[in-house]
């Protein structure tokens, strides 16, 4: 008797503007055997890593604009309907503030607003300078999002790209992958 083909989970990764964006290419290596991935990028993320990198790794078109005329519905709505989990990594202070206040003005923030945390897991993996991570505004935004049912993968402590040492470093790709796969 033939074995039924099981549908692979679909993870959408929202990449934001941080030097840690390069780690998402490594993260894909840990996810690719378990799930199909699609990447959406903020304009700031594109200053750190190119969409072509994620196209080559995932084999899926990368969402870099709200204005791509190739779909019958807006792509963020299609992706929200199709995904099994939304991962925002690296999650910047900016995207946390947008998510907490409902601002949707680029592909990643619009995708976040198009998903509901009680329907499918939405996970933030923050990365930012220690002061930004500890800032009362950021802490309040994280608390608000957690109260609404969003998941967080805590940042690591260590060397930061800005030359500082402290909390705010993106969790290692293996750690992110393990926690994401556990939520599927």
Image (tube, rainbow, N blue to C red):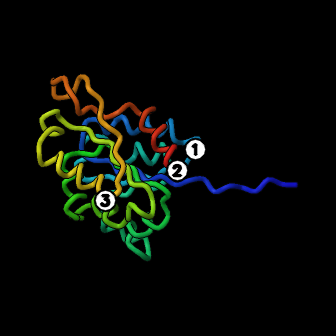
Q: Which residue is mark 3?
A: 148
What x and y, as percent, mark residue 74? Answer: 37, 72
What x and y, as percent, mark residue 78? Answer: 44, 68
Q: Is residue 13 visible?
A: yes
Residue sitting at x 31%, y 57%: 108
Determine the secondary structure under disc 1.
loop
Q: Is residue 46 visible?
A: no
What x and y, as percent, mark residue 39? Answer: 41, 51
| Image quarter of residue 176 | top left
CA distance for labels 2 and 3: 19 Å
What x and y, as percent, mark residue 164? Answer: 15, 24
Q: Is residue 136 left or right of residue 178?
A: left
Report crowding for label 3: few under 14, some 14 to 19, many 20 or more residues within 10 A (C-alpha): few
CA distance for labels 1 and 2: 10 Å
Residue sitting at x 32%, y 37%: 154
Q: Quadrant of the N terminus?
A: bottom right
From this view, report whether residue 48 is shown above or below residue 156.
below
Q: Which residue is mark 1?
A: 34
Callouts 1 and 2 close, C-beta under 8 Å: yes
Q: Depth check: give the residue in front, 116 or 29.
A: 116
Disc on res. 184: 2
């Amino acid at each position: 008797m033939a074995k039924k083909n099981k549908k692979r989970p679909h993870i959408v990764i929202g990449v934001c503007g941080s030097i840690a964006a390069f780690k998402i290419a490594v993260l894909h290596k840990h996810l690719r055997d378990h799930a199909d991935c699609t990447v959406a990028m903020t304009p700031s993320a594109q200053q750190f890593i190119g969409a072509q990198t994620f196209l080559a790794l995932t084999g899926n078109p990368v969402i870099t604009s709200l204005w791509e005329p190739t779909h019958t519905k807006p792509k963020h709505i299609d992706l929200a309907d199709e995904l099994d989990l939304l991962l925002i990594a690296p999650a910047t202070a900016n995207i946390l503030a947008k998510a907490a206040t409902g601002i949707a003005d680029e592909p990643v923030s619009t995708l976040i607003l198009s998903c509901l945390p009680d329907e499918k897991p939405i996970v933030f993996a923050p990365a930012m300078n220690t002061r930004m991570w500890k800032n009362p505004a950021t802490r309040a935004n994280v608390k608000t999002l957690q109260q609404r049912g969003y998941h967080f993968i805590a940042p690591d402590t260590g060397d930061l790209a800005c030359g500082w040492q402290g909390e705010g470093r993106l969790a290692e790709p293996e750690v992110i992958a393990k926690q994401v796969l556990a939520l599927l």
